[in-house]
Amino acid sequence: MTETMKATLKTLAPIIFILAATWMIYRLYGSPQAGVDDANITFSYSENLAAGHGLIYGHNPERVEGFTSMLWTLLCGLVFKLGLGERGVLILSVFLLCIVQILFLSIVRSHAAARGQKSWSYECVCLLLVISSPSYILWMTITLMDTCLWGFILACLTFVAISPPRTSRGRILTILLIVLASLTRPEAMILVLS
């Protein structure tokens, strides 16, 4: 097996496992069509934004901020503008969950390589912990809340903390990541300042 095939398999295998686990949990919970709690609040703002009414809740003319994540509201607004609805948000959530796992597995690989160890056993444990936790997968995807975006931002920040950028472009991307973190969750302001 060539190195390219091995690298492709190392990337595809976790994605397939995450997709299969998410599908099973989605079916187990009755294939919900709507988000949970805060997701529906965000969707009200996002749908109004997509329809050109601005960031308003329901059909109120007043612009009041009642969502937690500005970036998630904007991303959901884009998904609604594209006509993909809540299924599109679910696809985005699952995509972000897959990227998070790939980032964490990359961290595990680089840490094991730095110690001269093979990483496959650590990768298997990491992936097994994720797919054996229906609550985690449900919370990160099916609820349609901003948790998948926040998990993605945290994974990226962890990656940057472990492997600081060495180029000016990498530093600019890190600054952009910090700005995006602040737009994702209010508690990011404490996290990125420390």
Image (cartoon, rainbow, N blue to C red):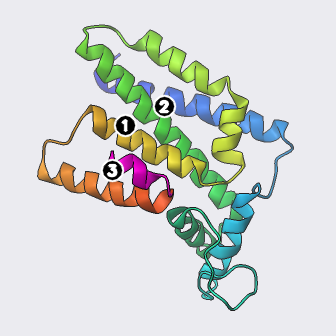
Using the image, determine if residue 73 lies above or below residue 151.
Answer: below
As drawn, which residue projects farthest toward the bottom?
61
Q: Of residues 138 and 181, which is closer to you in this image?
A: 181
Residue mark closest to the camera, 1 vs 2? 1
**Circle 2 Cα neighbour tier, 10 Å, few/some/many (<14 / 14–19 / ≥20):** some
Q: Is residue 182 above or below residue 157?
A: below
- Identify the residue at image location x=55%, y=62%: 69
Residue 71 magenta: no
Quadrant that contains the C terminus: top left
Residue 84 place in picture, x, y as percent = 65, 66
Per the image, label 3 sits on a secondary structure element best described as helix
Label placed on residue 193: 3
N-term mark: 3 or 2: 2
Residue found 32% across the figure and 14% down from its top: 112
- Residue closer to the observer: 53 or 22: 53
Q: Secondary structure at mark 2?
A: helix
Residue 100, placed above or below residue 131: below
> Magenta residues, as a range?
186-194
Question: Residue at label 1?
Answer: 158
At 44% from the left and 34% from the top, the residue drawn is 102
| Image mark for residue 12 | 2
